[in-house]
Amino acid sequence: MTQKTISHELAKECIFTALMLLTEKQDYEKITITDIARRAGVSRMTYYRVYQDKDDIIKTHLIEAFDQMVMEINAQNNYTENDFFPLFFRDCKKERNFIPQRSEGKHAGVCMAKG
């Protein structure tokens, strides 16, 4: 992994974490890109290199979380296509706060320490 890729992934995780922390204190609709960038400790320019808008943060995260879940389910030896949705909903139920819990990447501690 190159330094640029590592920086991009760190910024991405910090931005997502910042949005999740901000939504605990105010309505999603009222959160601005400036709020997110400031909380994440990144510039607006960095923000826009990673995401197009606020909704893009959530969409990207959900796609990545879903892809990860599919890989985990496919890795099971006795998996059949009929098993997918029961396992998917079991995982969602097990992790009530699905989005924040799935966001805890390797840099989450760094991201959450800023603020």
Image: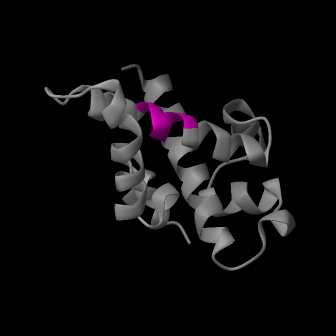
Instruction: Give the prevailing secondary structure in the magenta stretch.
Output: helix
| Colour setting | one colour
* Residue depicted at 47% across the width and 25% down the height: 5
Magenta region: 63-67
**Front position in the image: 51 or 93:** 93
Q: Residue at x 76, y 63 (%)?
A: 35
Q: Is residue 53 above or below residue 2?
A: below
Q: Quadrant of residue 47?
A: top right
Residue 78's x, y, as percent?
Answer: 15, 28
Q: Residue 19 appears at what percent x and percent y?
A: 65, 60
Give x and y (percent) for residue 61: 56, 42
Q: Nearer the viewer, residue 33 or 76?
A: 76
112 versus 41 height, above or below: below
* Image quarter hosting the N terminus: top left
Closest to the observer, 89 or 111: 89
Query: Is 14 above or below relative to 29?
Result: above
| Relative horizontal placement of residue 2, taking residue 45 as reference (left or right) | left
Q: Is residue 106 left or right of residue 48?
A: left
Quarter occupied by residue 88: top left
User: Extreme top residue here?
Assistant: 2
Residue 113 located within the stretch drawn in magenta = no
* Residue at 37 percent of width and 35 percent of height: 84
Residue at 29% x, 33% y: name it.
Answer: 73
